[in-house]
Image (cartoon, rainbow, N blue to C red):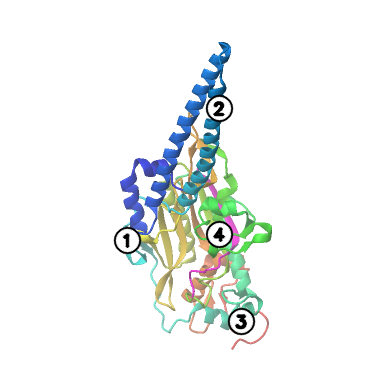
Amino acid sequence: MLDIRRILSDTDPCRKALLNRNPDIPIDAVLSEERALSSLRKQWETLRENRNRLAEEIGRKKRQGEDTDRLMEESRSVNGEIALVEQDLVKREESVREQLLLIPNIPHASVPVGRDETCNQETGRQGSPREFSFSPLPHWEIGTRLGILDFDRAAVLSGSRFSVLTGDGAHLERALMSWMLDTHTGRGASRRSGKAYTEVSVPLLVRPEMMEGTGQFPKFREESFQIPDDNLVLIPTAEVPVTNLNRNAILEADDLPVKYVASTTCFRREAGAAGKDTRGLIRQHQFLKVELVWLTSPETSYDDLEELTGDAEQILAGLGLPFRRIALCTGDLGFSSAKTYDLEVWMPAQGVYREISSCSNFEDFQARRAGIRYRPKGGGKPRLVHTMNGSGVAIGRTIAAILENFQEKDGSVVIPEVLRPYMGGKSRFTPEKSNSGKENP
């Protein structure tokens, strides 16, 4: 959530920055409501001053034995006015807060200005797309032929946008998760921050306040799977519970950065993605993801964003997957983000790069909602931390990328070398037999 004081003191630059994101952002409506609230606060203060004056005058007259009936009546009237104004204050304060919850973050000055994803800027590539001597198949066909992916049985169980991983497919998912977690928790001393990640295991069901704390609610309420009888929500990303681990806490400056890594199942309705990526593992209602979350200081957060993004890039580089880094423009930024890098992996069957990780700096936008602060060195008033997160990385999309990039003409798929110790030494998937023992088509 934005600081209303920032908007009031720097109105024109804030308005311009927000309109670069979306010309329909109701910033002027919030300012109008805040001005009305400010006027009401002044009225309340004037009434309280009047009440205090009357109380002093009543006390003086009583001490002098003079009649106070008129003053007492006037005081009762003022108290009634104060009560009515206070009721209105509560309503207007809540109205301002509700409107602020719908205003996205202000983009950082380094973010490219543009209306949509066509204005995003590529900032770097690693690895070169492979030249195939045959027409590469899409991952859903490869996985089905290998007998490790089953979308038909998933549809019987749960409907569309679900998948079943069988045998080597389930093993590959587990291997990726274990290798990613081992990689993130095993290094750190040589990093600029000097810290490795702390692994956490968190609930997959959270209270609605946690969703509000990270910016999913109220803006994207319709995108979530909710359990109203229990007032709980299935998490769309580990970002939600992990960021809120320090909700309403005051950290010490020496604790920063706090770096967490978590592997969780994620749940998304994808209500705004009708007709997109209906086949395969790219856009599922349920998927596994390794998430990186940082709580850091305002002074270092943009250097930290580079490091966090580098941590996600190291996963893709370790797997030998070609990828590129994209700086999102103002019109393509996520709601809570001040700056975002997307990492896109090469998908040979489609001949395009597809998003596999998104790394963002939210500055104090989430921290203000969730009440996460730190005490500066040397004392002083606690300040809001800056929060960041990034996929480190999405496992389903990584499986898709491995199947497509490392497929062979004979139908086999080479397993990346870093995963082989996690796959019992296996070096490739072969189509001779499925994991159920039946011949593959």
**Between discs 1 and 4, the one toward the N terminus:** 1
Q: Residues within 10 Å of mark 3 (few under 14, many from 20)?
A: some
Residue type at mark 3 is Asp
Q: What's the mark number on residue 178?
A: none
**Between discs 1 and 2, the one toward the N terminus:** 2
Q: Considering only vertical position in the picture, is 430 above or below 69?
A: below
- Measured Cα–Cα span from mark 1 to mark 3: 41 Å
**Between discs 1 and 3, the one toward the N terminus:** 1
Left or right placement of residue 28 versus residue 58 in this view? left
Residue 273 within the segment the image draws in magenta? yes
- Measured Cα–Cα span from mark 2 to mark 4: 59 Å
Q: Residues within 10 Å of mark 2 (few under 14, many from 20)?
A: few
Q: Which residue is mark 1?
A: 114
- Measured Cα–Cα span from mark 4 to mark 3: 26 Å
Q: Which residue is mark 3?
A: 152
Tell which tag, 1 or 4, sits nearer the viewer.
1
Whether residue 425 is visible: no
Q: Position of residue 60 (x, y in %)?
A: 54, 14
- Measured Cα–Cα span from mark 1 to mark 4: 27 Å
- Look at 39% across and 47% down and name the residue there: 32
Q: Which residue is mark 2?
A: 73
**Between discs 2 and 3, the one toward the N terminus:** 2
Residue type at mark 1 is Gly
Residue type at mark 2 is Glu
Q: Considering only vertical position in the picture, is 122 above or below 351?
A: above
Q: Which residue is mark 4?
A: 237
The region drawn magenta spans 257-274
Viewer-closest of 284 and 127: 284
Quarter residue 439 falls in? bottom right
Query: Is the Cβ of the residue at disc 2 closer than 8 Å to that at disc 3?
Result: no
